[in-house]
Structure formats: structure tokens, C-alpha cells
Amino acid sequence: MKLITALVLPIFLALVLGVGNVRAEEPQQPQEEPQLLILQVFSVCGPAEEQEVELLQQYGERPFVTGKGLVRTRVGFTEADVTIFASPSTFTFTVVATFNDGVSCILTSGSEMGPGKTRYVPGIKM
């Protein structure tokens, strides 16, 4: 009887104390981290005055807004005057960075310019 008690009592206590409730845990799914995409962009660069004249004469684009910005270069970030040129008649735009040395680089250009829209924050009206 003592032998049965010695064998059964620990098992009984383990079940009562919750050891019997141990379950195999489901494997944790790895959390997806947001991906950062870095584009290698080729820019058309030249003297700022020439680029401004070309944007006006060829596309009818004039300076619309300007501000200070950081532009990624092959050696890091460089401060530049960033200007958005736009044409209200052709609905085109060009984003230009002008550096301290007087060189301007076209960062991007596009068409179908219109009022801004909130795409990712529901309930916010522009």
C-alpha cells in the first residue's frame, strides 16, 4: 500500500496543482516588419538657371512651392532647396533639388496634378 501511495500521490498532486494543464504551445509566427525600400534613382542634373528656363519653356511649369529638404546622395544626406514646379494648364509637375553649388537635379516629375487626397487615414478630409 505504501508503494502505491508513493507512486500515485506525486501524480495526483501534479494534476491537482496544474502541471497536468501544460499544453504544447503553438509555434510563434514571426512578425513581419515593414519593409523599407530604397530606390537608386538617376537624376538629370545641371545648372539651376538652365533647368528653370527649360521647365518654363518646354512644359510651362513655374515654381509653385519651395522649401528646405534633405536629399539622399551616394555619400549620405545633403541639404538642398527643394522646389515643386507646376503648370496649371497642362497639370504637370517637376520636383527639383538645388544644391549650394548652383546645381539642380530633377528628383521626379509627373502629370495629372490635382488636389491632394488622404489615402491612408480614414475620416480625414483635405
Image (cartoon, rainbow, N blue to C red):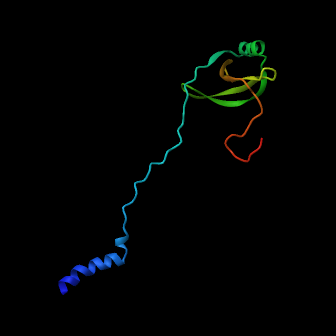
Position of residue 57 measured from the top left corner of the image (x, y, whole percent): 77, 12
> Would you identify the image quadrant in which residue 17 lies?
bottom left
- Residue 4 vertical placement versus 44 (above, below): below
Residue 14 position, x and y percent, is 32, 76
Q: Is residue 2 above or below residue 79?
A: below
In the visual, does 16 lie left or right of 97?
Answer: left
Apparent side of residue 19 relative to residue 78 in the rendered image (left or right): left
Q: What is the x, y in percent for residue 43?
A: 61, 19
Q: Nearer the viewer, residue 103 or 2?
A: 2
User: With 26 as the anchor, is 70 left or right in this view?
Assistant: right
Residue for point 70% across, 27% down: 82
Looking at this view, is 86 or 24 the one in front?
Answer: 24
Residue lying at the far right of the rendered structure: 89
- Residue shown at the point (71%, 16%) measured from the top left: 48
Quadrant in the picture for the C terminus: top right
Percent across and percent down for residue 46 are: 66, 14
